[in-house]
Image: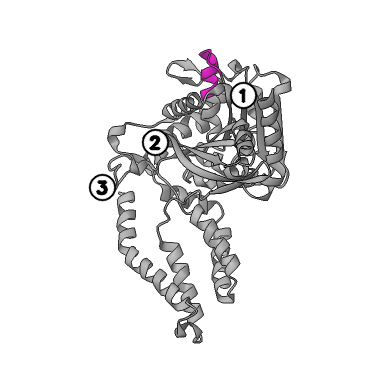
Amino acid sequence: MLYHLHEINRTLLNPLVTWSGAAANALSAPDNWLARMPGVDRIAAGYELFYRLGKDYEKPAFGITEVHAHGREAAVIEERSLELPFCNLLHFKRCSDDPQALTQLREDPVVLVVAPLSGHHATLLRDTVRTLLRDHDVYITDWVDARMVPVDKGPFGLDEYIAYVRRFIGHLGAERLHVMSVCQPTVPVLAAVSLMASAGETTPRTLTMMGGPIDPRRCPTQVNDLATHKPYAWFETNVVFDVPPNYPGKGRRVYPGFLQHAGFVAMNPSRHFHAHWDFYQNLLRGDLEDAAAHRRFYDEYNAVLDMPAEFYLDTIRIVFQEHRLPLGTWHVDGVRVAPEAIHGSALLTIEGELDDISGLGQTRAAHDLCTGIPAKDHAHLEVEGAGHYGIFSGRRWRDVVYPDVRAFIRRYHEA
């Protein structure tokens, strides 16, 4: 009943939260004479803080409309290349009215970014996509909130995730494709490509794996400890709930996004407390730039989705508790997942020195498994001073990581 109680609480608070947001806007409006009265700025700041703590955060937009590519500006159109019940394959199509520029854009490498299905929306990789668009034709997996998927669409477990990845790769054409997986999908992506190789299918030209739990036994983090210190039955009983009747997916078993969000915050509560206190102080000081930065970050961070229970529980059991991938005991539809069968793809792994979600060595373990790839086609990058998000977003991603990723992809694209 926890999910139902959460919805009741949200519904009851919604009028007060909405009123607080309206009051904050009214009391901080420059043309409102009340805004100039002593103490009103504190009241307005308090109302906005309450509003942002209690409001619903909808899925943000990517909002990428143009990019600087090949020395000139190119328009970007976001379109759905493929629609499936649990995921849409998005294409960021770059356009130009210059024939020469258009030819260059079409000759760029095609990159499939497999976004994590781990609570946040694919828009968390907005900076990743925007940067890649400078030199690549980019597609991304946009996972659908499980509460919006009707029960008659069937279950969605780790096997289905792998099948989706294989379908996306086949849709785009593996012979010209470069696949980048960020965090959680490193495991199912490696499994998907392994199964393709075992079946004699063409595999992508390159695999770039960033901060993922290929072998979570190495340098375990707080996330790994939680998954291993609790029995499987505990997760099945305590964190999986039915979707309430006010959503299309009513009755579907899910790991709710609000629980996942609570887990994110619990990993570093003091940081989030101070961030909101600083936001309140910035409003009082009139520091609108820092306040706007806070809003942008938490508009993304607080927007979460529900995960299908089958996928979540499969990940807990297969990836974190039984370690089937590194132990070589994982079978999908009766076929063993054999990374050693991959021989036609180059492999780049990327890890952050300070990653507190996927510890050092967990992603690099992919090289020990992919023994069929020649030594010259293995590469690894450890990003000094970077946490989990720093390897795919922000200054370190743009200035340190991306140049290596671009050079790696170009090397095998041109070959």
Asked if residue 70 is positioned above or below residue 215 in the image, the reply reads below
Residue bounds of the magenta highlight: 192-202
Residue 337 shows in the view: no
Q: Magenta includes 224?
A: no
Disc 2 target residue: 86
Give SS at disc 1: loop
Question: Closer to the observer: label 1 or label 3?
Answer: 1
How far is mark 1 from mark 3, CA to CA? 45 Å
Q: Residues within 10 Å of mark 1 (few under 14, many from 20)?
A: some
Give the amino acid type for the residue marked by disc 3 in the picture: Pro
**Residues at marks 3 and 2 touching, judged by CB atoms closer than 8 Å:** no
Left or right of 331: which side holds 220?
A: right
Q: Nearer the viewer, residue 173 or 319?
A: 173
What amino acid type should be assigned to the residue bearing mark 1? Arg
Residue 200 visible in the displayed image: yes
Return the x and y of residue 269 as percentages of the image width and height.
Answer: 54, 57
Using the image, determine if residue 202 lies above or below residue 286.
Answer: above
Residue pointed to by mark 3: 245
x then y, percent, for residue 134? 63, 42
Q: CA distance from mark 3 to mark 2?
A: 19 Å
> x, y (%) of residue 34?
45, 84
Label 3 or label 2, whichever comes before in sequence order = 2
State the image coordinates of residue 81 (x, y, percent, origin top left): 45, 34
Distance from label 2 to label 1 (Cα)? 26 Å
Residue corresponding to mark 1: 205
Q: Main secondary structure of the magenta part?
A: helix
At 56% from the left and 26% from the top, the residue drawn is: 190
